[in-house]
Image: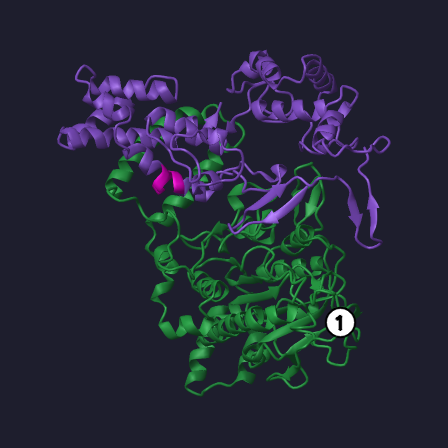
Chain colours: A purple, B green
Amino acid sequence: MGVKDTYQHDESEITLKPAGEVIIPKIKKRVDPKYLDGPGEKEQLDEDVREKLARWITAPENPWFARAIVNRVFKHYMGRGIVEPLDDFRVTNPPTDEALLAALAKDFVTHGYHLKHTIRMILNSRAYQLSSVPNETNRADTLNYSRYYVRRLLAEELIDSMAVVTGVTESFPGYMPGTRAMTIPEGAPTYFLQTFGRLKAREVICERDNSSDVAQAMHLISGQTIQNQITGKDGTLDHWLADKSLTDEEITRRLFMATLVHPPTDREVAQVTAAIQSGGGNATARRQAFEDVLWTIFNSKAFIFNH
Amino acid sequence: MYNDFDRRAFLKVGSLSLFGFIGYGDVLRLRAQSPAPAKRDIAVIHLLLSGGISQMDSWDPKPDADSKYRSQFKPIETNVSGIRISEHLPMTATQADKFVIIRSMTHKLVSHESALALICSGHEPLGTIQFPAMQAVVSKELGPRTDLPPAVSIPSVTGSWEKSGFLSTKYNPFNAGNPNADGYKVRDLDLPMGVDWSRMDRRRSLLALVDDEFRRLDTSGISESMDSYYQTAFTLMHSAQAKKAFQIENEPENVRDRYGRTSLGQGVLLARRLVESGVRFVTVSRGFNVYDHHKNIFPLLQNTFLPELDRAYSALLEDLHQRGMLESTIVIVTGEFGRTPEINAGGGRDHWPSAFSLAMAGGGITGGRVYGSTDDKGGFVKDNPVQVADLAATLYRKLGIDPEKEYISNIGRPVKIGNNGKLLEFLMV
């Protein structure tokens, strides 16, 4: 592989070199590519060496690849890897449940390395579908998945979810308007994505930090991203407000159902309708009151956390 | 052992001395008699020279070394006889009576990330334990002093080594942004257009209703830490004091120029304003790895890096001194390691942890001293080696934090925050 710096800040062009050999600078000796566990292979000039490497990595005889991948997928959905930290597979850091990890890995290999298959299995599992509400016997458990572990949505999940709810297009520089953040291959083109933990181009994936902090709170409270999402025109909110058949209670209910998947309580509805009345009950007051509902939902823990 | 004296006592003394009633000897006598130290009053400003600045070309000149090693810069005299530093730190040289140069810092870590983790935490990093940075420990142990967060990084943390490690992320430093930018503002500190506080308060009361439900589900402490972020955010946004502290544009032009119109210069000036407003630990960097001069080290240092550091650092010491804040503010200047004595083929110097220099001023430390020394090339410590853990333990002691205190780490192993570092007696006087 070759790396060429480009004129753009923070960006480089990665190119494929015609040959895979390396020169050891000190002794100027040429070294041909070689597998970790086997003989070197004479490369053909017409073949991309990465394809050979990929075949070696994903060969069913390689015991490590499947375990590492299923562990990552498992962590993504379950909040904790069977091996944790994700990239520490040394013998001194054993999995919390070897049988589970082995079974997932074997299943992944026998099903042709289909991530969707593994994901479907995890999502259909009893463990994934357990309630996150702790009871007396599992309150202290943080290892054995005896309840669902609450986790913060990823940067991409958060902004995509907001855009789906509001129907307001979110734009990412360098991408078509309306692109889902989840489909951006690499880099963090907006402050929102960056501050919620998406990595810049060429940062290492295990450096990704999905924890929360004050900057995130401030951006959710008063940042331009949320402001655009809730005040954007011609979105879901405008359509509902224009629909004469929808009462204020019904719009409130719909917003809650679309985001928190439960209806608002009477107190919550009362507060929303009171805000509309105290604002004069006109169109502006209505819109502002519902913008406030959207702000509240997007700042609520029930929205920000998968639970 | 612990003889820093009360800041208020100093201010009183300072104002008396204005009228000529009292001299420096009296100050020292008063210091000896002063009561228990006001532990919580000492703040830290760390100028983090990420990348590792060359010791031979800054604090530890070796003019007699062979040309393979010798700096292109000449040493100059400072205002303390016998102490000589690089000719490109002329303003700093006039402040040498205020700082101690430790020329015998030493460790074994040659990668930036590991060495930064060590410098910021006092612990060599391990694969399994993420040690909290000193600023996070300070946040946890001492908490906020005012509306402002206890720890701030300017412009922002250079990496995970400035963060809370295995402690709650609520102890992460707050990122202030780059105060040298035109129209500098802390991001998202002001309410968006068209939203006033009465509307924001309505939103918050609805949010309290909605969040109430979630609290029931949560045993992981997420609610508690999220609440603390929102609390901190709203406190900051509401606070006139915080807003004022970040308004660097209120500084007179001549002061801003004196610190230098560079991100480091304005960062250091903002650090002073923040400490004045109650922040306990400010890290000022110029971004990650900018002092990593593997090539063309001499022009880089001479044209950019030393002059801006010289300006910013000397301005800070002068300013803190004039405001009577130096006794209650420790200023540390260091990178994560030094650089090779031998100049490489590209005209640069490479990573070198065996010996490097650190300058420390304020917080009751008597300046005008050099501690430790290196061999004739500047590559190895000749006497009085100082480990980073010693420095961390001593710093904690000066801040009134017990370095022997144990935290339970993420793997359940107890960890002493001062990492068994030795107390450096020379920094206690």
Q: Amino acid at mark 1?
A: Gly
| B8 or B324, nearer to the observer | B324
Give me the residue at 50% from left, 19% from top: A133
Q: Per the image, is A223 magenta?
A: yes
Label 1 CA crowd tier, 10 Å (few <14, some 14–19, many 20+): many
Quadrant that contains the N terminus of chain B:
bottom right
- Describe the element under mark 1 as helix, strand or loop: loop
Q: Which residues are magenta?
A: A219-225
Res A76 → quadrant: top right
Side (left or right) of B6 relative to A275: right
Side (left or right) of B75 relative to A253: right
Assign the magenta stretch its main secondary structure. Answer: helix
Point out residue B326 in the picture as x, y percentages from the top left corner. 51, 71
Q: In the rendered image, is residue A160 in sight?
A: yes
Quadrant that contains the C terminus of chain B:
bottom right
Side (left or right) of A187 relative to A276: right
How many numbered callouts? 1
Point out residue B63 in the picture as x, y percentages from the top left corner. 73, 80
Point out residue A86 in the picture as x, y percentages from the top left corner. 67, 31
- The residue identified by callout 1 is B378
